[in-house]
Image (cartoon, rainbow, N blue to C red):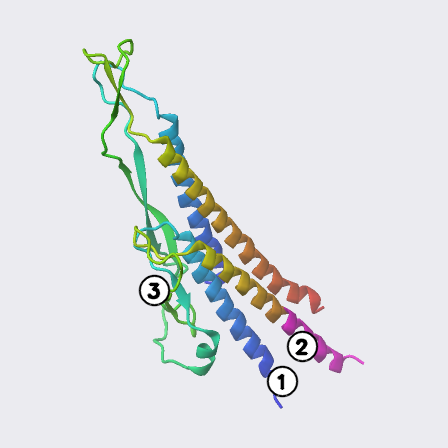
């Protein structure tokens, strides 16, 4: 049994969620930008399953690929399954979808934080008399 | 850079572009009746704004920026008003090509987008607070 892995899992999910939050806020900020296509991140289970090979950033001057916001999360073009489709200006951001995504992120992040907290409490319980 | 801090910055860029858009709308509305001051002179011409997106090197995120200010090249409306200093010899005054309905719709849209960005900032702040609460609880 390796219960300590829960912390690793939780921190990976938290970092995935914060990258997703960044992508969603990029979409919302660019909701009126012509030719901007909405983006999303790959699902969390895909992040867990794959360990893709990346180019290392050994110098702060190295440009990061915009599809590589963090070490393990990929940013991809969102599927065009939204009701709004592609607007006249070539923009495909649906504000409603993005707002519901931020709500989802917040809920998952809070669940994550609460789980870490309770797990931490459980560990402390074994330490204290 | 931390993605949550980056998303604060990105939403901030959204707020900035939308408020610039609102500024252009209010310039247009304020000048909706601004004629020239010599006979036959051109009146105020409606201004437009175009947004673009730009890769921010510090955060690796994509910021929303104002790409270009432009002018609307559509025709001026004409009114008969011989007493106006800008009237030509036939008494016709050129009026700005500002359509109130279009400006109002634009204003509403800018408002909504501003609110959406504001909401994102609030959400991001709550995510940061959730993380900080872990520290508070674990003493």
Q: Position of residue A1 (x, y in %)?
A: 62, 91
SS label for mark 2: helix
Q: Position of residue B118 (x, y in %)?
A: 51, 49
B125 falls in the magenta region: no
Q: Chain of mark 2?
A: A
Q: Chain of mark 1?
A: A
3D distance between C-alphas at marks 1 and 3: 39 Å
Which numbered disc flags the more N-terminal residue, 2 or 3? 3
Magenta range is A114-129
**Magenta stretch: dominant secondary structure:** helix
SS label for mark 1: loop
Q: Mark 2, mark 3: which one is toward the viewer?
A: 2
Residue at the (20%, 17%) spot, across then down:
B40
Q: Chain of mark 3?
A: A
| Disc marking residue A61 | 3
- Which residue position holds label 1? A3
- Which residue position holds label 2? A119
Q: Are labels 1 and 3 assigned to the same chain?
A: yes
Say which of B63 and B73 sits in front. B73
């Amino acid at each position: 049994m390796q219960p300590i892995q829960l912390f690793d899992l939780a921190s990976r999910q938290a970092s995935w969620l914060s990258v997703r939050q960044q992508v969603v806020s990029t979409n919302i900020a660019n909701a009126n930008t012509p030719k901007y296509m909405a983006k999303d991140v790959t699902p969390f289970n895909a992040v867990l399953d794959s360990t893709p090979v990346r180019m290392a950033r050994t110098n702060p001057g190295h440009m990061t690929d915009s599809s590589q916001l963090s070490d393990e999360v990929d940013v991809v073009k969102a599927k065009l399954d939204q009701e709004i489709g592609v607007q006249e200006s070539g923009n495909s951001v649906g504000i409603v979808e993005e707002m519901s995504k931020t709500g989802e992120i917040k809920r998952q992040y809070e669940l994550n934080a609460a789980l870490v907290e309770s797990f931490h409490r459980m560990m402390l319980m074994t330490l204290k008399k | 850079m931390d993605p949550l801090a980056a998303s604060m910055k990105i939403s901030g860029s959204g707020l900035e572009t939308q408020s610039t858009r609102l500024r252009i709308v209010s310039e247009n509305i304020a000048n909706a009746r601004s004629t020239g001051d010599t006979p036959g002179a051109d009146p105020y011409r409606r201004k437009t704004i175009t947004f673009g997106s730009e890769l921010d090197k510090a955060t690796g995120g994509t910021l929303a920026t104002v790409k270009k200010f432009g002018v609307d090249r559509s025709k001026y409306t004409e009114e008969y008003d011989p007493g106006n200093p800008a009237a030509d010899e036939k008494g016709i005054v050129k009026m700005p090509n500002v359509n109130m309905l279009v400006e109002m719709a634009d204003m509403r849209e800018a408002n909504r987008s501003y609110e959406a960005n504001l909401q994102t900032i609030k959400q991001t702040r709550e995510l940061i607070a959730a993380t900080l609460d872990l520290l508070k609880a674990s003493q």
